[in-house]
Image (cartoon, coloured by chain):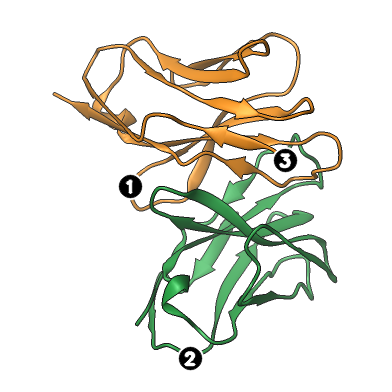
Amino acid sequence: NAGVTQTPKFQVLKTGQSMTLQCAQDMNHEYMSWYRQDPGMGLRLIHYSVGAGITDQGEVPNGYNVSRSTTEDFPLRLLSAAPSQTSVYFCASSPRVSSTDTQYFGPGTRLTVL
Amino acid sequence: AQSVTQLDSQVPVFEEAPVELRCNYSSSVSVYLFWYVQYPNQGLQLLLKYLSGSTLVESINGFEAEFNKSQTSFHLRKPSVHISDTAEYFCAVSDPAGGGNKLTFGTGTQLKVEL
């Protein structure tokens, strides 16, 4: 298993541009989520999904959209990039929708918005 | 609402010395507790977790954490650290009563092991 994969690893955008961060898992996990990591702030939940076709907002959803058309894929879309969205983005998945489950993280995407 | 406090942003320690990384949480309900580790330029991976039962939980690489309900703490300890333990450590909580898989993270503690 490749686990959780994310592309690209690095990205530089100009203010106002849009882009999609890709996330895929090959473990047939029900739950998937997106976090952003900023210095001194830990990780904050952006959006999450409890199964194909079901998504919901996390702590910091503004400026981001998600969809989950398949169990495997959970892309994160930036609609109009802003410098405040400069961050490291992590995708994670869990086998079940359960607060006891371990979350498996991808390697991250480092995004810079100029 | 839950919150997690990691008071130490950085902890320098010499190799083979003991270390304690502190974690306190605030919640009006019972929670599950996790420690995740992030090695340089990698994603997070689970170190250990407390769900129920024995308040002392151990990881395979020598770390342990003790759940203390009265002090709302879940400090991480290792009796003798190695250079390879250099990483950032995150404490996190989840809510059994409807929070699903959502984790609330602390701000992280950077452990730097020196020779």
> CA–CA distance between discs 3 and 2?
34 Å
Question: Distance between the Cα atoms at labels 3 and 1?
Answer: 31 Å
Q: Earlier in the sequence, mark 3 or mark 1?
A: 3
Residue B1 got which mark?
A: 3
Q: Amino acid at mark 1?
A: Pro
- Chain letter behind tag 2: A
The residue beneath circle 1 is B40
Q: Which mark is residue A69?
A: none
Of A29 and B95, the residue lying toward us? B95
* Front of the two marks 1 and 2: 2
Pointer 3 and pointer 1 on the same chain: yes
Which circle, 3 or 2, is nearer the viewer?
Answer: 3
**Mark 3 crowd level (few <14, some 14–19, many ≥20, 10 Å Cα):** few
Q: Quadrant of the N terminus of chain A?
A: bottom right
Name chain B's colour. Answer: orange
Residue at 50% over, 15% down: B64
Mark 2 secondary-structure assignment: loop
Q: Position of residue B61 (x, y in %)?
A: 44, 21
Q: Residue at x 45, y 22 (%)?
A: B22
The amino acid type found where label 2 is placed reads Gly
Kind of residue sitting beneath label 3:
Ala
Q: Quarter of the image holding residue B103?
A: top right
Q: Do the residues under discs 3 and 1 have CB atoms within 8 angstroms?
A: no
Q: Position of residue A77 (x, y in %)?
A: 61, 79
Residue A30, quarter of the rendered image: bottom right
B64 lies above or below A44 = above
The residue beneath circle 2 is: A16
